[in-house]
Image (cartoon, helix red, strand yellow):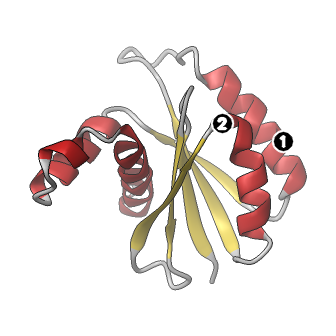
Amino acid sequence: MGRLLSIDYGNKRCGIAVTDSLQISINPLAVVSPESLINFLNTYLATEEVELLIIGWPTHKNGVETYLTDKIKTFLITFAKLFPAITIVKVDESFSSTEAKDIIFNAGTKKKKRRDKALVDQVSAVVLIKRYLEGI
């Protein structure tokens, strides 16, 4: 069994989270710029077995795709060419950042750390895996 990898793709930062190889625990992995995402994944996937990529799919409340979906589609085309053995699943990312902020707050994180946008992006990626595993 391979790991599950999730990406909360953003204009400035991409939060990345991953499960352990038994898919029991979910952990934040990194935050990288969209421009360096493929290089990061090349390095990571050279040493780790990943069976599934979970990508946050942004839509408006009415279900219409956002401005970011075209960038994500372009990324997914490149990803699929480079890593054809890894299945790609889109998960609705609606309110994942809000849920991530709640998780960070409830964990007792200090106020200064809660303002760290990179932390929110990583925890948002954790939320995406959680949603996938729960079938949401």
User: Taking the image as drawn, is residue 70 in sight?
Assistant: yes
- Under tag 1, what secondary structure? helix
Amino acid identity at mark 2? Pro
| Cα distance in 3D space between marks 1 and 2 | 13 Å
User: Taking the image as drawn, is residue 136 in sight?
Assistant: no
Depth order, front residue of 100/92: 100
Q: Residue at x 74, y 36 (%)?
A: 75
Crowding near the residue tagged with mark 2, few <14, some 14–19, many ≥20 C-alpha atoms within 10 Å = some
Would you identify the image quadrant in which residue 98 lies?
Answer: top left
Amino acid identity at mark 1? Thr
Judging by the rendered image, the residue that carries numbered circle 1 is: 78
Residue 13 x, y percent position in the rendering: 54, 36
Judging by the rendered image, the residue that carries numbered circle 2 is: 34
Which quarter of the figure is the N terminus placed in? bottom right
Residue 68 x, y percent position in the rendering: 58, 21
Query: So how many labels did they put on this image?
Result: 2
Would you identify the image quadrant in which residue 34 lies?
Answer: top right
Q: Residue at x 80, y 72 (%)?
A: 46
- Under tag 2, what secondary structure? helix
